[in-house]
């Protein structure tokens, strides 16, 4: 394929120039030189290679303050396309994007009890083909992609081990990389989903202000991705729930990981529902007119929004535990930005506001410059988009 032939011929200077244009384009040559400290002759050689390879293009001219208008260069949005996939506990998502990180197509489906690995991959292929048809792009233009998923996993071998709380059976030692590559007939890289999300958000930020980022996804589990000085910090076995299993109460609730008192025991969707139901069974008043076996997280959200004291109490307790854990964590790692995301954050403003209250209450005074953001720039698309961008990074940067 032409793409791979061009990639093989790129030098380190070529890649350095491409990376700067990818992150901060459109740029003039003067700006690129400022970022790279290259000589003009060296830059010109790299620019020629990148333009001949169709990775960058001229897009116009910058307004001049006098004299000739300088030419602007940007990545080529029309030549190469990539697929990004997000497999989570409750849904799977497929996006198609270009070199400019523009999401041209996205669609997701629910991960129900019948969504075994085989059926999930078939559904991903169906959605992918639907995207191609809708965009009018021939398949050969999609040169590769990435998968962001839950752990534990081996990203090199492309295997998902045994994730907790999947609705469907069969998710145990799944060779997901091989399965997706066979189904989509292209190269796919896989990575911890929280890591792909934090990488997407890193690309959206400025080079200086946001080179240290923490991404927290709060849902069925609590997942975290961290970038320090522009580099993803890996965890053992790509276990993106390591923060969720930080012990905050030695004598607390038993956790499926074998410990007691983990953050996830108090601040995940399952733990919040469990806590609420247990209090109802003890006789606490509730406005939810349902059997305790059928109470859902969305029911508790509605109850909290209607002003029910019990629902608000449970949300505040979970947010307090998560907030204290996060305050302790950011005090140690000192990020410039913390992105709070996932179903709990996105669906409940009440939980989110409680969370901010307890973070601010327990954070160190010298950490007051940390920026806390709800959802981030890419919201629910961050995991899938970051997976596609990691493929690009692997090949071009």
Image (spheres, grey):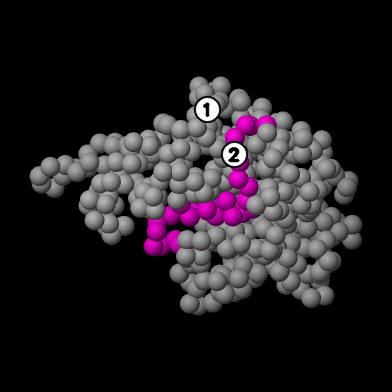
Q: Residue 211: x, y in percent? A: 45, 62
Observer able to see residue 30: no
Kindly state the secondary structure of the residue where label 1 is placed: helix
Question: Which residue lies at the image location 68% right of the left edge and 31% below the top edge?
Answer: 183
Is residue 192 positioned above or below 97 on the image? Answer: below
Residue 187: which disc? 2
Residue 362: mark in rendering: none
- Could you tell me if residue 1 is visible in this image? yes
* Most distant residue in the bottom direction: 365
Q: Which residue is drawn at 42% across and 39% down?
A: 6
**How much space separates mark 1 and mark 2, taking CA atoms?**
12 Å
Q: Residue at x 39, y 50 (%)?
A: 11
Q: Where 92 falls versus 196 (above or below)?
A: above
List the residue tagged with mark 1: 140
> Residue 363 falls in which quadrant of the image?
bottom right
Left or right, 103 with reference to 258: left
Magenta residue span:
183-212
Q: Residues within 10 Å of mark 1 (few under 14, many from 20)?
A: few
> Is residue 249 inside the magenta stretch?
no
Q: Please tell me which residue lies in front, 59 or 182.
A: 182
> Would residue 211 be found to the left or right of residue 146 on screen?
left
Residue 190 is a magenta residue: yes
Q: Which of marks 1 and 2 is nearer the N terminus?
A: 1
Point out residue 221 in the picture as x, y percentages from the top left corner.
Answer: 72, 55
């Amino acid at each position: 394929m032409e793409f791979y032939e061009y990639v093989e011929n790129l030098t380190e200077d070529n890649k350095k120039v491409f990376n700067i244009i990818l992150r901060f384009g459109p740029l003039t040559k003067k700006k690129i030189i400022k970022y790279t400290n290259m000589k003009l002759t060296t830059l010109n050689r790299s620019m020629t290679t990148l333009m001949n390879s169709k990775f960058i293009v001229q897009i116009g001219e910058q307004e001049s303050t006098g004299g000739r208008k300088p030419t602007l260069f940007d990545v080529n949005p029309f030549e190469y396309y990539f697929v990004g996939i997000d497999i989570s506990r409750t849904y799977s998502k497929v996006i198609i994007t270009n070199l400019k990180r523009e999401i041209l197509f996205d669609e997701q489906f629910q991960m129900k009890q019948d969504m075994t690995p085989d059926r999930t991959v078939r559904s991903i292929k169906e959605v992918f083909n639907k995207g191609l048809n809708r965009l009018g792009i021939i398949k050969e233009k999609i040169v590769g992609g990435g998968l962001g998923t839950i752990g534990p996993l081996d990203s090199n071998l492309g295997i998902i081990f045994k994730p907790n709380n999947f609705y469907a059976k069969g998710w145990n030692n799944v060779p997901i990389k091989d399965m997706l590559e066979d189904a989509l007939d292209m190269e796919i890289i896989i990575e911890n989903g929280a890591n792909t999300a934090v990488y997407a958000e890193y690309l959206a930020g400025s080079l200086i202000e946001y080179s240290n980022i923490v991404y927290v996804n709060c849902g069925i589990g609590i997942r975290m991705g961290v970038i320090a000085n522009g580099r993803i910090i890996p965890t053992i076995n790509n276990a993106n729930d390591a923060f969720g299993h930080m012990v905050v109460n030695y004598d607390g609730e038993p956790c499926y990981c074998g410990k007691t008192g983990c953050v996830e025991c108090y601040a995940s969707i399952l733990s919040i529902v469990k806590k609420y139901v247990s209090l109802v069974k003890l006789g606490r008043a509730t406005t939810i007119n349902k059997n305790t076996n059928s109470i859902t997280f969305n029911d508790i959200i509605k109850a909290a929004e209607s002003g029910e004291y019990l629902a608000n109490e449970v949300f505040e307790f979970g947010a307090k535990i998560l907030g204290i854990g996060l305050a302790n964590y950011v005090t140690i790692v000192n990020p410039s930005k913390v992105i709070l995301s996932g179903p709990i954050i996105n669906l409940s403003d009440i939980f989110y506001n409680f969370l901010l209250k307890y973070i601010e209450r327990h954070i160190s005074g010298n950490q007051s410059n940390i920026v806390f953001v709800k959802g981030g720039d890419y919201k629910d698309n961050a995991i899938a988009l970051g997976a596609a961008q990691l493929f690009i990074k692997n090949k071009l940067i």
